[in-house]
Amino acid sequence: MAEGNILVIDDELVMCEFLRDLLEDRGYAVNFVLSGNEGVKAFQQGSYDAVVCDLKMPDMDGIQVLERIRELDPDSVIIVITGYPSFETVQSALRLGAYDYITKPFNIEEISFVIKRAIAFRKLILTNKRLMKDLEEQNIKLVS
């Protein structure tokens, strides 16, 4: 069983293949797409523990992808990567709920660590929601 399902969204095929190979070697199941629009569609059709999304893409930039995915799943964990960092993009991405922001070229161990931590964070969020729901249901049964 995979350590987690990851969606990579980047318009550079070389980067997608690199991340796929790197993450699959670490036990993750990886799907990649080459545009923001394809990324949103893939997210709607799949179940992902983390999304790694490039910031600069021609059809839909990473900030727009981040907004759309967070609308679809507010608990999604999205890691933004970019070769063109700026204070404004960091601020925008984090304000919109990005889990982390990594600049290219990145250290292999850094991205591996961030993804591992992001997936653990998502699992905690989902476990907490499930436990809260169970607790609410138990309270309702106790009160009735």
Image (cartoon, grey):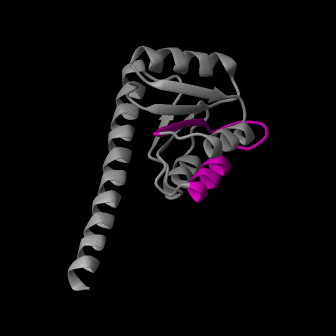
Q: Does the magenta stretch include residue 99?
A: no
Query: As drawn, which residue projects farthest toward the left?
Result: 142
Give the image quarter of residue 3: top left
Give the residue drawn at x 42%, y 21%: 107
The span picked out in magenta is: 49-72
Residue 1 lies left or right of residue 86; in this view the side is left
Residue 106: % across, % down: 47, 24
Across and down, in percent, residue 44 comes to 64, 46
Residue 136 in percent (x, y) is at 29, 72
Q: How many numbered discs sit on the rendered protein?
A: 0
Q: Does the magenta stretch include residue 62?
A: yes
Residue 7 against residue 60 in the figure, above or below: above
Quarter occupied by residue 54: top right
Q: Is residue 119 above or below residue 107?
A: below
Residue that appears at 58% across and 48% down: 89
Depth check, front residue: 37 or 45: 45
Residue at x 28%, y 60% (from the top left corner): 131
Quarter of the picture containing the N terminus is top left
In the image, farthest residue toward the bottom: 144
Q: Quadrant of the C terminus?
A: bottom left
Question: Relative to 40, is 142 on the left or the right?
Answer: left
Q: Position of residue 98 (x, y in %)?
A: 49, 49
As rendered, which of 45 and 76 lies closer to the eye? 45
